[in-house]
Image (cartoon, rainbow, N blue to C red):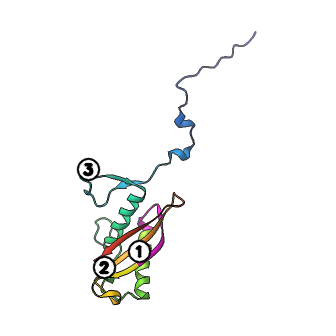
Amino acid sequence: MAANLTTNIYGSVQTDFILESPKKHKKDIQGFEFPAGSNPNSYFCRKTGVDLIKGAVKQLLLTEKGERLMLPNYGCNLRKYLFQPLDEQTFESIKNDIILSFNKYIVGAKIAKIAVLPTGEFGPLGGNSLNVILTLKIDSEALKIFDVEVNIQ
């Protein structure tokens, strides 16, 4: 007696989406635009990549610790350095504050270089504002390097 071997297929054939490599469908990190409401078409706009990281870094550097509800340690206390002379000790303190906060709250980028410049009417010996320039490198892209500039007043 010969056995009748048949195969029944139920459902649909696999789509190209399933057969493609998983790297093609890697999800980008997404977030809200900073500052909120700066786009006239929509109050909350979605951002990805460089725009998202630039907004997050500006928000982090311009926020004082204790200023944000539910996140009392969020931010960098950079305003306390405004009327101090920008010497090596002050620069190291600013750099340490930025690096600690950056590593804790920013995802998807690494700091390549930090520059702190006094701006204001008093010149390099002191001043009433600081210009902080961070050169950042995106983790997911090999050659994506960009600057974020924030003026602390």
Is 41 one of the magenta-colored residues?
no
In the picture provided, is 106 more to the left or to the right than 45? right
Residue 57 in picture, x, y percent from top left:
38, 66
Residue 47 in picture, x, y percent from top left:
37, 54
In the rendered view of the protein, which quadrant contains the N terminus?
top right
Residue 79, numbered circle: 2
Residue at 38%, 87% (x, y): give it.
Answer: 86
In the picture provided, is 84 more to the left or to the right than 92? left
Cβ atoms at labels 1 and 2 below 8 Å apart: no
The residue labelled by disc 3 is: 42
Residue 79 in picture, x, y percent from top left:
30, 79
Residue at 27%, 58% (x, y): give it.
Answer: 36
Residue 84 in picture, x, y percent from top left:
33, 88
The residue labelled by disc 1 is: 98
Q: Secondary structure at mark 1?
A: helix
**Front residue (pair 23, 134):** 134
Q: Secondary structure at mark 3?
A: loop
**Front residue (pair 104, 60):** 60
Q: Earlier in the sequence, mark 1 or mark 2?
A: 2
**Image-quadrant location for residue 70:** bottom left
Can you say whether 5 is above or below 53 in the image? above
The residue range painted magenta reads: 103-115
Crowdedness of circle 3 by 10 Å Cα count: few (<14), some, many (20+)?
A: few
Q: Amino acid at mark 1?
A: Ile
Real-space Cα separation, disc 1 to disc 2, in angstroms? 12 Å
Can you say whether 37 is above or below 133 in the image? above
